[in-house]
Image: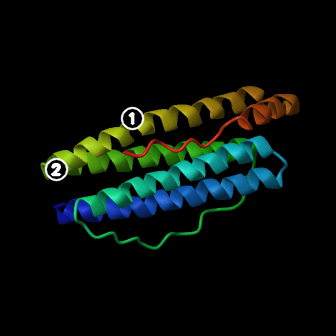
């Protein structure tokens, strides 16, 4: 049985992951609206990954005999000043998610909840990858600067990203 404090914190994280999915979907819409379809694809895949994260937490709470309570999900922004500013926001958001995951890991340790600690190791590793990926694209956009050809080359590269659901256990 999952402890109430851990259950409540994971329920809050489920809501956060759903917001993350909506944020990336909004970013996909922004990129599509400015004809950067590769970036739109990248963000759409990211939205799918975030929803998968929410479902992973959702299933975990239920598997531990807990009760899932999804909170109110705020609307994300829908416009950014530039392709770079949208990706900078994505990177900042991933840093925030990492902090939330770390807080959950600290709570699992405090509550001596080893099962949750094991689950959170997957998310901690995932966040290292998420931050690195977003940071790399931010840096590449900065290198491209005002070069439209550089932006279009990056956009073309972003089209290749595909959502690959993890294997079910």
User: Would you call the spot at circle 2 few (<14 residues within 10 Å), some (14-19), or many (20 or more)?
Assistant: some
Residue depicted at x 50% and y 69%: 73
Q: Quadrant of the N terminus?
A: bottom left
Residue depicted at x 31% and y 56%: 60
Side (left or right) of 55 relative to 85 = left
Return the disc, 2 or 1, that comes first in the chain's sequence. Answer: 2
Q: Quadrant of the C terminus?
A: top left
- Residue found farthest to the left: 112
Residue 69 found in image quarter: bottom left
Helix, strand or loop for disc 1? helix
Which is more toward the observer, 147 or 68? 68
Side (left or right) of 117 relative to 157 = left
- Residue 146, percent across and down? 83, 33
Which scheme is used to colour this image of the protein? rainbow
Helix, strand or loop for disc 2? loop
Mark 1 — residue? Answer: 125
User: Would you call the spot at circle 1 few (<14 residues within 10 Å), some (14-19), or many (20 or more)?
Assistant: few
Find out whether the residues at labels 2 and 1 contact each other: C-beta distance under 8 Å.
no
Residue depicted at x 39% and y 35%: 125
Side (left or right) of 153 relative to 75 = right
Q: Is residue 9 visible?
A: no
Residue depicted at x 61% and y 53%: 24
Residue 161 found in image quarter: top right
Mark 2 — residue? Answer: 113
């Amino acid at each position: 049985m999952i402890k109430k404090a851990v259950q409540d914190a994971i329920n809050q994280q489920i809501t956060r992951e759903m917001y993350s999915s909506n944020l990336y979907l909004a970013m996909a819409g922004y990129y599509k609206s400015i004809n950067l379809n590769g970036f739109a694809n990248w963000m759409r895949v990211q939205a799918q990954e975030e929803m998968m994260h929410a479902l992973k937490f959702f299933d975990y709470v239920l598997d531990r005999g807990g009760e899932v309570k999804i909170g109110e999900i705020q609307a994300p922004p829908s416009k950014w000043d530039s392709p770079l500013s949208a990706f900078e926001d994505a990177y900042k958001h991933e840093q925030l998610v990492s902090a939330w995951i770390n807080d959950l890991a600290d709570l699992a340790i405090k509550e001596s909840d080893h099962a949750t600690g094991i689950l959170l190791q997957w998310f901690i590793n995932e966040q290292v990858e998420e931050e690195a990926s977003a940071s790399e694209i931010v840096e590449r956009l900065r290198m491209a600067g005002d070069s439209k050809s550089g932006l279009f080359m990056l956009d073309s590269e972003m089209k290749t990203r595909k959502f690959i659901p993890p294997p079910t256990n």
